[in-house]
Structure formats: structure tokens, C-alpha cells
Amino acid sequence: MGLEEKLPEGIITTQLETLVNWSRENSTWPLLFGLACCAIEMIATGSSRHDISRYGSELFRASPRQADLMIVSGRVSNKMAPVIKRLYDQMSEPKWVIAMGICASAGGPFNNYAIVQGVDKIIPVDVYVPGCPPRPEGLLYAMDKLRAKQGKDNFRTYANLNASPAPATPEDIESLETLRQPQRA
Ligand code: SF4
């Protein structure tokens, strides 16, 4: 029993866009980094019990140039924000972001001058995962939502983008320094 029996003629027709989306859905490689306690749950997602490789996403890449998914797992400190922005800019299009946990999504219990109140203040987010921390099943559910989104992608989106935004310059990083200013209630 195999694909050959389903396709006795050995021919399948489809749209290129569908084929590309299908391959992206099944080989999204996350960037290898974690920020806080949520990262432990993200690491557990790669264990045999939860098995993120079902989605072809077990290859956590240590280089942003080889990754197309950023899982922000933990609170984003003002000191870390410019680093995350730079890593995101270094990832090539198409790329996606999951904000894992309430800290990455909205600052969580840390409503203070040291923590960015949601990573979407500095980079676009595709899927938010609630919880403190979310369980691995929560992250896998977010991956399902992301895959549904990837399946509806069309080439025109990226054609209109023309090119990836230029990598962050030292001046951009400096402008992010404003995030370090104390927040007023
Ligand atoms: S959401 Fe909870 S578990 Fe995750 S980083 Fe924040 S405090 Fe830690």
C-alpha cells in the first residue's frame, strides 16, 4: 500500500503554489534560541513524547539564515529586544513568528520597565499561544494554525514585498534603545 497504488498512472497534477505551500508547511525550521521558562516547554516539544518532527520542524537551526520560523519562548527584556529584531531581519522571506506564552504575547506578569509588553512591539507575530507556560501541545496546536496559514499563502504576497527589509543597521538598533526608557503608568 503506497502512493503508487493510489496513482496507478504515476501522474499527479497540481498548482505550483499548492506544491510550494505544501512543502513549506511540512518543513518549517525554527530558529534555535529560547528566552525564559517557556523555552523548556519548547524543548520538550522536540522530545519523542511530543515529536515536533511530525511537522518536519525538528531541525532547530543555529543560524537565522537557515531558519524560517522564530518561536519567541519567554519574556523579551528591553536589553534582548534589539538582538531579536536583528535575528528576525537576518531571516530570509518567507518567515513566520510564534509568540509562545503570555510573556512573549503581552508581557505577562512583568508589567515593568525591563520587559517589552509583547514581542509584536518589535516584529510581526503570526500566532499567539496563551498560557504560563503553554504545554508542548499548545505549541503544536500553534504549529497547526501556522500550517493552515502557510497553506493559504500566495506568491503575490512575496512578489509585492519585492525584497526582504534591509538588515537592521547600528542606527536601527540604537533607535530600539528607546525601548529601554522606563515606562510610565
Ligand atoms: S509565560 Fe510564564 S512560563 Fe513563559 S516565560 Fe512567562 S513567566 Fe515564564
Image: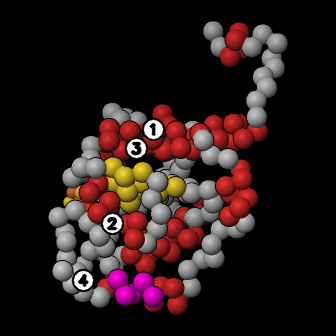
Q: Secondary structure at mark 3?
A: helix
Locate residue 179, reporting x and y percent: 35, 83
Question: Can residue 46 be seen by looking at this rendering?
Answer: no
Question: Can residue 128 be seen by looking at this rendering?
Answer: yes
Three-letter amino acid code of the residue under disc 2: Gly
Locate residue 33, reporting x and y percent: 40, 61
Q: Is residue 173 above or below residue 61?
A: below
Q: Is residue 106 left or right of residue 86?
A: left
Q: What residue do we see at 71% from left, 9% from top?
A: 5
Three-letter amino acid code of the residue under disc 1: Asp
Which of marks 4 and 1 precedes in the sequence?
1
Q: What residue do we see at 38% from left, 39% from top?
A: 141
Tell me the mark number nearer the camera, choosing from 4 and 3.
Answer: 4
Q: Secondary structure at mark 1?
A: helix
Rounded to the nearest whole Å, what is the CA distance between mark 4 and mark 3? Answer: 31 Å
Question: Could you tell me how many numbered marks the image carries?
Answer: 4
- Which residue has dot 1 on it? 144
Label disc, if present, on residue 118 of the rendered structure: 2
- Which residue has dot 3 on it? 142
Q: Is residue 88 left or right of residue 178?
A: right
Which of marks 2 and 3 precedes in the sequence?
2
Rounded to the nearest whole Å, what is the CA distance between mark 4 and mark 2? Answer: 14 Å
